[in-house]
Amino acid sequence: MKLLLIPILALGVMACQNNDQAKTTTPETSQEKEIVTDLRADDVPSSAYNFKDLPYAADALQPHIDAHIMELHYGKHHKGYYKKFLNALEGTPVKGKSLTYILSNIDKYDAGVRNNAGGYYNHWVYWDNMSTEGGGKPGEILRDEITSAFGTWDNFVSEFNDAAGSQFGSGWAWLILTKEGELEITNTPNQDNPLMSITDMQGYPLLAIDVWEHAYYLQYENKRTDYIKAFWNVIDWEEVGRRYQMAKEGHYYMP
Ligand code: MN3
């Protein structure tokens, strides 16, 4: 899994680089420039937006999420957002801007950029916060912070499930760390996310669940609640804990 760390300043974007992770190539030719893939840079070529592999096999999360859903969801839906995102950039001032910049200034762009930039980013958050070794609870530090923020672990689970279950129509539920340093649960419609300038509750994404019907309908039909319940068996708390530590240091997850 390749992760880049992106600092944010009050969730409006700014970028000072994390030298450990940064690709510090200074391209001298246009050909070299095309292979720079640092999404933290202020300006990036469209080729910086890649479509990496799933972090596991399509059938790896069975029985909780079946292979047919994974193949369609990743290979058709997510890839579709990716292609439309690249198309939406063409011929607009957004082309060449980093994902950080785009999400933080999303109010300036049309629905095509908003929906597809979100669709491109959100699914990476989701794929990467699931694992074949998932389930259980996070390590002690995050577990203590969660129980402190939500009263009890069960309350946290219940609130997260409510946010996922009550999102009207298509959207996402999130555990985030706000810029004030508070753990919060929130949900967003469509492909919006907590990094977007138009979102009421902004913060660093720690955990995401996709509650679009395409994420569960083939397996769970209309029973979104059953899908949400199954999701707890595949949550990669190690990754969520890693994101939490990153967030406390002012960095957030990037694909
Ligand atoms: Mn989806």
Image: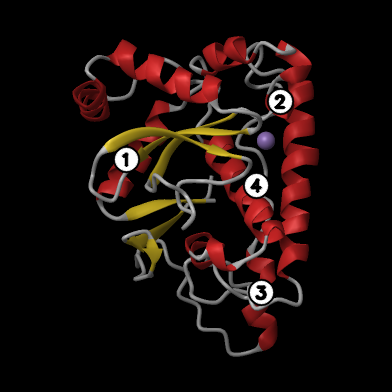
Q: CA distance from mark 3 to mark 2?
A: 31 Å
Q: CA distance from mark 2 to mark 4?
A: 14 Å
Depth check, mark 4 against mark 1: the one in front is 4
- Side of 188 relative to 243 (left or right): right
Q: Is mark 3 within 8 Å of ligand 1?
A: no
Point out the image quarter for the N terminus: top right
Which amino acid is tagged 2? Glu
Ligand 1 shown in quarter: top right
Q: CA distance from mark 4 to mark 3?
A: 17 Å
Which amino acid is tagged 1? Tyr
Q: What residue is rendered at 53% in x and 28% in y?
A: 130
Mark closest to the chain's N terminus, 3 or 2: 3
Which label was assigned to residue 95?
3
Mark closest to the chain's N terminus, 2 or 4: 4
Mark closest to the chain's N terminus, 4 or 3: 3
Q: Which residue is mark 2?
A: 213
Which amino acid is tagged 3? Lys
Depth check, mark 3 against mark 1: the one in front is 3
Mark closest to the chain's N terminus, 4 or 1: 4
Residue 41, position as x, y percentages in the image: 48, 72
**Crowding near pointer 1: few (<14 within 10 Å), some, many (20+)?**
many
Q: Nearer the viewer, residue 85 or 187?
A: 187
Q: What residue is rendered at 67% in x and 76% in y?
A: 34
* Position of 134 relative to 20 (above/below): above
Q: Which residue is mark 1?
A: 244
Which amino acid is tagged 4? Gly
Secondary structure beneath disc 3? loop
Residue 119, position as x, y percentages in the image: 65, 47
Please report contact status of discs 2 and 1: CB closer than 8 Å, yes or no.
no
